[in-house]
Amino acid sequence: MFTTTNTGFSGKVKTVLIGKSRSLSDAGLFHKLSLIAFFAWVGLGADGLSSSCYGPEETFLALKNHTCLSLFVAMASAATVFIISASYSQIIEMFPSGGGGYLVASKLLSPTVGVVSGCALLIDYVLTITISIASGADALFSLFPAAWLHWKLPVEILGVCLLTLLNMRGAKEAVLPWVPIFLAFVISHAFVIGYAFFTHLGQFSEIVSSTAADVRSAHHEFGWIGMLLILLRAYSMGAGTYTGIEAVSNGLPLLREPRVATGKRTMRYMAVSLALTVAGLLTAYLLFHVSPQPGKTLNAVLVERLTQGWPHMGAAGFILVTLTSEAALLFVAAQTGFLDGPRVLANMALDRWFPARCAVLSDRFVTHNGVTLMGAAALVLMLFSRGSVEYLVVLYSINVFITFSLSQLGMVRHWWRERRAVAAWKKKLAVNGVGFILTAFILVSLSLVKFWEGGWITLLVTGLLVAVAFLIRHHYDVTRLQLRRLDELVAAVEVDEAASAAAHAFDPKAKTAVVMVNGFNGLGLHTLFGIIRMFPGVFKNFVFVQVGVVDAGNFKGADEVERLKQHVRNESQRYVRYMQQQQFYAESVCSVGTDVVSEIAGQVPKILERFPHAIFFGGQLVFPHESWATRWLHNYAVFALQRAFYLQGLPFLILPIRV
């Protein structure tokens, strides 16, 4: 029996850690993998909601002695959430297959602008993972003595590793364990905000008076412009609050059908919960006169103030539940980076801005290379920053507003172009126009405020990533031009599409050439003609084996997979018809899956049973200048196949095809 290296002890370890392989033949596969709106709110909305653990705090602390001005920032933050959410709902309607900021900018502006948007989003998702886990550790260690703080960084590193492993299992598996924690966070923080308001109903007039006095004081001290700059800086320091809003549009392929309706419902859940939580916490800080304490977050101080006078056990229990749920939710928030980051990377890989292998799916239908890269990048950043939220928040949120601004600009351009075809174009343009003005204003403000504090690092790294993307795209473009010479052979080969009857009788005792192909193209034809030239008159039977690889680009529903199967059948049959016309016996063997080696391994026993005198062949492109870069950027599955056949004692010949 033909086996692969995935069996045995390593296979058992993989099954325990990551889970059993999933099958495309499972009729309920897409239903099992997709998320309903509530679970999407947990997995994708946790990023924004969890930012209430550090966003409002950064805003409040940035105001220094003028904390009453936080009411203005609270209203501005809530308005920003609703405006960005409304504009992204229109993006969901227009791009129901997902893609988010990268796809919007690429399609509606230009591919060059799209790669800038995509790279900015990738860096932001790495920062989302890092700052969420670091902030979660801060909240967790607020419960422990200060002497334990030296354990914080190891816990953060462990958190990155565990979440990376969990996301290898799949989106739903990575989300479901966190649902109780998410609900505990929502309920406890809704209680905190509600309790703060209802216990201070008689003090709101005092808050208004204090705010008016603070405005006069700030004006006297700094002038109107100075006061506006203070408000702007506080607003920008809390801008990380809005970074999860775009996650739904990027993660639409993860959602349950009908995806647009599910996406818009998820967006509403996110907008309402985020706006109320952020504005409510900023107001609660004022009502309880919260001030910073060493080793504790402002939320921890707020909950302690709120529970003063409660019975000891009740107060201790509520503090424990609230702060533990905060810490855990911040770990859940890192899910957004793991769910959407690899998807953005895969979309860019499909357009050849990044290595094609970044779009490959595992047997769990997870973009495992993307998950690994996101986890590794977050780990490096965690070590570099030593898990400092104060440092990370400076790097954070600039990039997402690059994507926000470009997405809104693309939508504005689209509605203007389609103004004669869309009846409600003015309303739609107004929504995205306001979104563009707001996000562009925040982007400029963030860049100015954070640039010299360390924001330049984010912009520099993003620029370097864009440069790498262009180098990779250049390599693929050059390779594509080189392959055109091979593909000229396709036009030279005439295939009578109507031919179907075998021109040569089947002889199971005859020598059989089993040829691995990947479409009716120059590589496959050169491999075929190389066999005929090197072994004239030896082979009477030809079998063409083709595997349709399911990747992030076509794994979007049962219909897409069925189209892939049909395409694979059509392409392999073209070889069959051609060889029949050349008086050979020929047939094809087709399948679809995520791994070429394992799919072919499943077909080999059947092929050998029917053709006992078979020899297997595969073609491999040989580039003028081989390097580690070409090995990383191109698929060398044929060598993995040769090794698998070698271990089984089966002949497998690789024919080098120069480009």
Image (spheres, grey):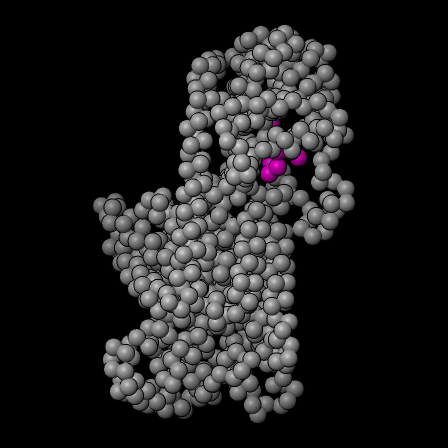
467 or 289, which is in the foreground? 467
> Can you say whether 96 is above or below 42 in the image?
above
Task: Identify which residue is drawn at 49% across, 61% down.
Answer: 127
- Residue 567 seen in the figure: no
Q: Residue furthest left?
A: 420
Residue 602 in percent (x, y) is at 69, 31
359 on left or right of 585:
left
Please say whether residue 592 is one of the residues in the magenta stretch: yes
Residue 294 in percent (x, y) is at 53, 82
Please say whether residue 293 is one of the residues in the magenta stretch: no
Task: Identify which residue is drawn at 37% across, 60% down.
Answer: 401
Residue 616 in percent (x, y) is at 66, 22
100 or 431, which is in the foreground? 100
Task: Identify which residue is drawn at 55% across, 51% down.
Answer: 373
Quarter of the rendering occupied by the N terminus:
top right
374 on left or right of 412:
right
485 or 422, which is in the foreground? 485
- Quadrant in which residue 282 is drawn: bottom left
Task: Identify which residue is drawn at 27% across, 82% down.
Answer: 222
Residue 74 in percent (x, y) is at 38, 75
Which range is magenta?
Answer: 590-598
